[in-house]
Image (tube, helix red, strand yellow):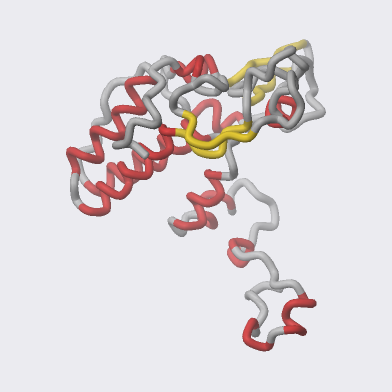
Amino acid sequence: MIANNLYSWEGNPAKEFLRESPAIIWALHPGVAGVNTKEARTFVFSSGPPIRPSLADSLVSAFESNDLRRNLWIKTVTNSSGTWYCAFKYKKTSNTGTSQEYSILFRLAEQYLIRAEAYAHLGNIPGAQDDLNKIRTRAGLPNTTADAQESLLTAIAQERRMELFTEQGHRWFDLKRTGKATEVLSPIKPGWQNTQVLLPLPQTELLLNNNLHPQNPGY
């Protein structure tokens, strides 16, 4: 994905989610000409208290100072009742005549973060730093100070959180695959049980196939 000539880096984060972005690897047309993404209609709101999902304060405050993504990809909504934040990666909530935003499934920035993590696990510290800094530079941030495997893996995980929020459930899958789901979620999710990293196997499937037994723990 990174080495071929089909996709190229989009250096302006304000254009990352427009349909003409050269960094889009796979995106879905909204289905009707002029209509834009369901993501925008799901996340964007203009008044509060919002009736749509808002971003957690903990996510918003985790952005580094001067991070362009904080200003361009998050919208702040304030009134006399309080302040809320909505995901603003996709901005078009109405028909624009020609669809301007498609729902992106894969984009080039994610591939750099995947490779950075792979490099870190392989002990290729300069390679991991270079790929991580590709993301940070576009966001207007200085190069990472992480210079060892563990610190780089931590920095990459943090960068994935900042770069990929509200996209395809990346944060959940990252926490699950790295074994950090309970550590991160138990303090903030009431009633969290560590068995919740797995879904229950459907009873109908268990009845049809004995090889699926036993049921996942906790169910």
Is residue 164 toward the left or the right of residue 210 in the image? left
Q: Name, please, the residue furthest toward the bottom.
A: 210
Q: Nearer the viewer, residue 150 or 209?
A: 209
Q: Quadrant of residue 166?
A: top right
Is residue 196 toward the left or the right of residue 137 in the image? right
Q: Which residue is pictured at 46% across the width and 18% down the height?
A: 13
Look at the picture and state if 147 lies above or below 65.
below
Q: Nearer the viewer, residue 9 or 60?
A: 9
Q: Which residue is pictured at 59% across the width and 61% down the height?
A: 197
Is residue 142 toward the left or the right of residue 25 in the image? left
Residue 22: % across, % down = 44, 24
Residue 210: % across, % down = 68, 88
Is residue 128 toward the left or the right of residue 74 in the image? left
Q: Which residue is pictured at 49% across the width and 21% down the height?
A: 21
Q: Quadrant of residue 130?
A: top left
Quarter the C terminus occupies: bottom right
Q: Nearer the viewer, residue 12 or 25?
A: 25
Look at the picture and state if 43 lies above or below 196.
above
Q: Which residue is pictured at 65% across the width and 57% down the height?
A: 192
Q: Nearer the viewer, residue 191 or 63?
A: 63
Residue 167: % across, % down = 58, 37
Q: Quadrant of residue 28?
A: top right
Residue 148: % across, % down = 20, 44
